[in-house]
Amino acid sequence: MATELFIPKLGQTVEEVKLVHWLVADGAKVSQGQEILEVETDKATFPIESPTDGHLHIGPFPEGEVVPVLAVVAVIGGPDDCFEARRPSNPVPTTMSTPTPAAARAAVPPVAASVQEGSTFASPRARKLARETGVDLAQVRPTGGNGTRIVARDVEALAGSAPVAGVRVRERVPLTGVRGLIADNMARSVHTTARVTLLMEIDATALVELRTRHKDRLSHEWGFAPGYNDILVKLVAEGLRKFPYLNARLAADAIEWLEPVHIGLAVDTDRGLMVPVVRDADQKGLRQVGAEFRERIERVKAGRALPDELTGGTFTITNLGMYDVDAFTPVIRLPEAAILGVGRIAPKPAVRDGVIVIRQLWTLCLVFDHRLVDGAPAARFLQYLKQRIEGIVELP
Amino acid sequence: MKPADRKTACSQTMKTQGVSRDDLLTYLRQMMEIRALENQIATLLGQATLRGASHLYAGEEAVAVGAVAALRDDDWITSTHRGHGHAHAHGDCHAKTPAARQEHYNQMMAEVLGKSGGYCKGKGGSMHIADVAHGNLGATGIVGGNLPVAVGAALAQKQKNSGQVVLCFFGDGASNTGNFHEALNMASIWKLPVVFVVENNLYGMSVPWREVSALPDVASRAAAYGFPGIIVDGMDVLAVRGAVAEAVARARRGEGPSLVEAKTYRWFGHSHSDPRVYRTREEEAAWKARDPIHRTRDDLMAAGLMTEEAFEQMKREVDAKLAAALAFAQTSPEPKPEEVDTDVFAPAHTTPADCAAEAQLRQRLRAEPPARVITYAQAIQEALREEMLRDGRVFIMGEDVGLYGGAYGATRDLFKEFGPWRVLDTPISEAAIGGAAVGAAMAGQRPVAEIMYVDFTPLAMDQIANQGAKNRYMFGGRTSVPMVVRTEGGAGRAIAAHHSQSLEALWTHFPGIYVVMPATPYDAKGLLKAAIRDDNPVMFIEHKMLYKEKGPVPEGDYVIPLGVADVKRIGKDVTIVTYSRMVLLALEAANRLALEGIDVEVVDLRTLKPLDIDTVVTSVKKTGRFVGVTEAYENTSFINEVMAQVNEAAFDWLDAPMVRVAAANVPVPRAEILEDIAIPNVERIMAACRKAVK
């Protein structure tokens, strides 16, 4: 009896996924727990594991097609089983409900169909490249074989990634999966938001001393010592309660101030930038916030984060201080209203009471979308953070 | 014959030959065991529980047993498709205890049944039983196939001065093959220690000997080669033993070969499916009345050396032994499926470190100004000379390789340095050259045989491909055939269709043989040394237009491992895969295409087998375009195989259809203008590259 392979519900908000890539060939033997399919939600890509041992028989969904969750996309059984006989229902492929450029690409008809419809052929290399870059071959002008065959350079030209003449490309990283999502989201943000950046230098000497004082004890009691990111998440969350216009999003006809405060923290992983989220950070203690982030970051880095852990943020913090960056202007993660860029804490000369002294200085960079917030209110939020940090006497 | 006369005759013969009662009882037992084995196999075939061809030896037992009885333990035999008798007589003599003899009998039966416990692990079967470790160079399915092999094994004994003799069995049918004449001639000119034993059972399959030979006796043909031809009663074990013993003694004395013709008869048909319509039942009955087993039994009894009871006891023992062998064979496991592709080649001695060292040497040679430049012919000669100095087993044989120094000068001066027994001028007998190399290699030498033109290699194809290339596999991995056949091919000298071909595809087709085709002097020297040291047959095909080409070649020893291609030019737009002289044309085409902005990568395969497909695929994945260039006929050329493998391994990386540039499917014409059209040139290679990148 063949076992059905269906798309699991990858989180509360996920209704559809895109079939990115089958990791094993149709008909091949698979074993229970083996990753056999990569799917993509609007947030990230996820591997789907085989529920059993057997031969994989893939259903009639081309790679790139969007299917609803719980759709049966393959069966796993004996070598001679076939998908059709076991298929209980025929889910109607739909497009993503909130179209993004990535989803729009996913909705493009499969490559083979477009080639069959037209009279042009595409080389195997061109097809492979088109798959990897999401280029629709129907849109490509063929130049190979006297204009009868789409070749790799034609796809490259449309993908906008044609190597500049005379420049040798060492390696091509296809814009698929997480990398493709990052590219789409960042471009959309930069092209649609009205970005303003505020830089503020903060004296973190008291914070450094406070953290140093409690570090060993908490490390022993909590199992970890809270870092500056954890403390900042707490301070920001509490600040957003007081300045709700930065905990907001832009709808079609309104600015929506959001009830919960969910803070995202940008994390660098092998698969690209990921943003695990801690919900209701304002209502949780420092210990819980720190513990949740640690657990999530670990899962994100292992590629095992759940979709709900990567979605639903209302404000994002990104820290490049560990790379000795002093200040930078990050890109707002849509549909959020602002993002906080965090530089390094370093001893620097400062003027106190007319005297140059060495203090632990820290630059915070608030990037906000001027469509939702004006400069002065945003500055007030940053000033609030400065006061909290400079006057800190106990951990939040 | 009256019993009294019989007694006298038998006693006298035994005395003359120095044969004891025990010896004669052993001969009788061996003959009965052969008969029992053959009868059992006939039964199994009749029950259809045994498949495959079995050519049964029943009736001819006295020949194998008598001839092998005349040998020393360190002597050698070669056998035939009707070989169970030879293998049993030989194996039984080498087994020194009853247990060892039973084990030998078991292995015979298991091999006939194609079981893993057989002499050849079930890979050879009835027609290919061998025991090379003990001097049985094996049976062959090709009639006459082992005559040249026996000559080569005998040549090895002569070179080693071992005092050992080779006994070569064959049938009346084989004595009408070219191999017979080439082998007998070659053995006689070099006075080799070989005894040819022809089992004349009167029929070559169905055709009577009298209809295919004007001479009534095969033995008469020995006169043509200047050595004795003796006729003997093949139904009399002592008569056979006596004649062969005399021939063996003559061979051991260094006086050369003999031909012993044993007149005999097979009880069964040629094979199981033979209705024997070509012979009368009266004729069969007359021969069966002369059963060699009865003859020996009666002799023993007449001489008072054996009682009726003793004979019955011997019969019971043979039956028990046969039952045990059958039980062993039937319970012996089938060969494991993974055995299907083991034993094709002897393992390589080269390591990844050798490959890395050679890659470094190549890089250094390209980076530095050449310290020494010599021709391709000199590089070949240097490799031969160095290997002959390094290893006393290496020797050269071929047409005009001696004083003349080879048709293209590749063996120049070696005759003077190494003498006539290590640089042998052969008769114009390509089959015997190939087969002698096989036999010498199996007997421990490392021959380098030269076939003057690759166009002539089909004359030696059976010997090199059917015997040399397959013996290791057929014999269950229990032999190796370390030999090199040097030859040259290619067009360019306006010498037309019999001296200008590129026939490498004939050779790459056979399993068990490597094919090497160097393009530069550096490659030629390093690859030839590797080929000589390799334990497998290697077809080393040079190119006649390259002998005068010069290039940097390191002095002294270096080896290029077989199966490593060389990227002769790095490029990004299109990959040319080629070998031999076409490498030079491809490089010229690449240099000219660079002016058009097309950046060509040139991969020189260097060895076609083993094929370095990884280097080819890596290049195709980079460029996305493949142009295969070969000087061979386009139809079924080796480059087609490369294209099929690229298609399997790199289809998704191809950006254009693969393109071939090959010779026209016509005999190579004499007229230069036609030859230039028929053979790839630089312009055609350039056009193919333009087509691929267009």
Image (cartoon, coloured by chain):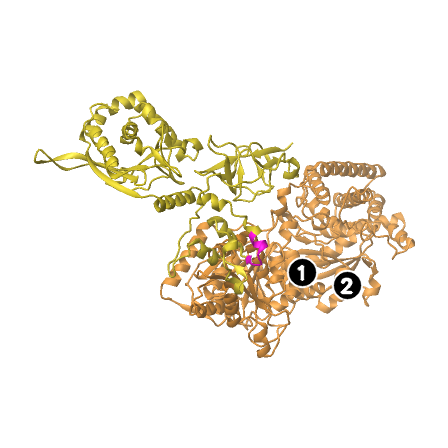
Chain colours: A yellow, B orange
Q: Outermost residue toward the left?
A: A354
Look at the image and say whether residue A119 sits in the magenta stretch.
yes
Chain for numbered disc 2: B
Q: Secondary structure at mark 2?
A: helix
**First in residue order: circle 2 vs circle 1:** 2
Front-most of B581 and B15? B581
* Residue on which the image places disc 1: B462
> Which image quarter: residue B223?
bottom right
Q: Outermost residue toward the right?
A: B282
- Disc 2 to disc 1: CB gap under 8 Å: no
Count of marks, rendered view: 2
Residue B219 is marked as 2
Look at the image and say whether residue B290 sits in the magenta stretch.
no
Residue A134 appears in the rendering: yes
Residue A110 is marked as none
Chain for numbered disc 1: B
Specify whether B294 is left or right of A47.
Answer: right
**Residue B259: % across, % down:** 73, 61
- Amino acid on which disc 1 is placed: Asp
Front-most of B229 and A135? A135
Q: What range of the chain is rendered magenta?
A: A114-121
Rounded to the nearest angstrom, the CA distance separating label 2 from label 1 is 25 Å
